[in-house]
Amino acid sequence: SAPKTAKLLRLNEDGAYKQVFEGPVSEPTPWMRYLYSKLDFSSVKEPGLYVVEYAGQRTGVFPIAKDVYSRTWQHSLDGFLAVAMDHVSVREGYRLWHGVSHLDDARQAPPNRKHFDGWSMGESLDSPFAAGQHIPGLNVGGWYDAGDFDIQTPSQFAVIQDLALAYKEFDLQWDQLTVDEKARSVEMHRPDGVPDAVQQVKHGILQILAQIEAIGHPIPGINEPTLRQYTHLGDGASKTDGRMYSDKLGPYEVDGNFSGVPDDRWAFTTKSPGLQYGAAASLAAAAGTLKGWDDALAKECLDAAVKLWEEEHANPTPPATDSQWVTGRGISQIQEWRAGLELLIATGGGESYKKRLVEIFPAVRERFAFGGWTAVRALPYMDDGFKRRLEEAVKAYVAQLDKELAGTPFGVPPSLGTWGGSAGVADLGVRMYFLHKAFPEVVSTAYTLRAVNYMLGTHPHSSTSYVSAVGTSSTLKAYGNNRADNTFIPGGVIPGYVVIKPDFPECIDDFGFLWFEHEYTIGAASKWILAANAADALVRR
């Protein structure tokens, strides 16, 4: 039978381990094919390095300290997200991560097109440009979305809003990048006096503004025209020739900035209410971040956000019906809510935004985890009645969440789909931090700490951190755009385990070619930056 107790050992300066605690393990919790027990050693407070010993096995070394989370997110900001920056070169000392990519962006995607990787265009282009025509101005800003090189605009929205919120809430002054947008140059490990979060927000918002300037509205994104380019691995700058395609030139002819090679990426230009509101939210959030660093751009962002909001209410965009960019009414309403919330904050309590938020809150609270929880950020501008209604919603949500998590050993949502669930767990950590901050009697700190500990190794299958280069043992073979080298990008966040039917949790440590377990995404990285800072703030209080 299994031992009833486990030990906590401290690593001394001489390399020897000393037992400092022994306690009972909990009754096992069955989940999938395994049984999970817990050891509560929270009474041990002395800072140091420790291992747990149970049944003759030892865990990897882990720290106990007040600053245990304080150095867990920086690689994601100045490492992974820096490497993902499009339309610039990214250098780390002697190493060039990639040259200036996609200077030839972009050509108008053709109509009635079912493309690969879920991309499509409907009958209407929603664009002033003809199919195949070059759209000027799109070769600026933005990030490679994941283990590939496309720009997915909703992902850009998520990163901009996450980083803007992290900068505002946690005062992220971290500075390890030199970013020169005019020179299209990024240098890693070279501070330039501007916080990296501010520069990253600016880089993302430049792409959103470029879309609106060129086409008249935000678009779904920019993707490769051919499968051969889509499967490209290596330097993003070598995926196209960097010259705008001209049908007046032969296949191998070059004339200045033009060539006869049709390798330019395609802009997918379907207009949708979700993209309109997503852009408004991102622009409004960015305005607050850029204020004091680039006041002209901050004003441009806020003006553009207000204009999008007013246009969408005066003449609503019909929902897309013939492409992948279809969104249901509930999701579109959440996106409207987020835009109204960011504008409320950016304008210091604008009455029109406040009025609309109050109107749609009853519908938004039905999707509390998806976005309704962000109502706590509106509390400084709302009356006591709104706060009471929100507190009731929080209590109902926490009761339902506790019921859903009761059968899981890790206290976070289990990953039961075809894509690992780490980003959702990080999002839980962020969500519960802000709910705890607003309603500490209703929401404990445990949810956020469980979520962050999950990301760093307290999860099924292994104790490997899902954040590359962070943790005693972390993911060092991942599905990034450098996976051809069987390696990783520091700060990238993988999806994590999936359940192989019927009951086997799997996340292979030494094989990074399974996208559903190992593919980096920019949204997961930005959500981790928020979650890790939230946990750090909680333990330091």
Image: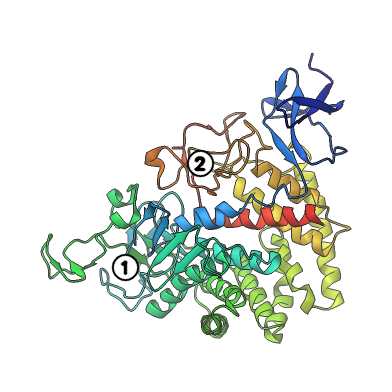
Rendered location of residue 92, percent (x, y): 43, 54
- The image shows residue 298, relative to residue 29, as above or below, that is below
Q: Is residue 350 visible?
A: yes
- The image shows residue 117, relative to residue 123, as above or below, that is above
Q: Which residue is mark 2?
A: 518
In this orientation, which residue lies closer to the viewer: 206 or 191? Answer: 191
Instruction: State yes or no: discs 2 and 1 in contact (Cβ < 8 Å).
Output: no
Q: Amino acid at mark 1?
A: Ala
Q: Is residue 27 visible?
A: no
Residue sitting at 73 percent across and 32 percent down?
A: 13
Q: Amino acid at mark 2?
A: His
**Secondary structure beneath disc 1?**
loop
In this orientation, which residue lies closer to the viewer: 167 or 373? Answer: 167
Q: Which residue is mark 1?
A: 106
**Which of the 4 image quarters holds residue 196?**
bottom right
Rendered location of residue 413, percent (x, y): 69, 44
- The image shows residue 414, relative to residue 79, as above or below, that is above
In this orientation, which residue lies closer to the viewer: 112 or 210? Answer: 210
Left or right of 115 on screen, residue 520: right
> Badge 1, how many Cα within 10 Å: few under 14, some, many 20+?
many
Rendered location of residue 98, percent (x, y): 37, 55
Left or right of 503 on screen, residue 368: right
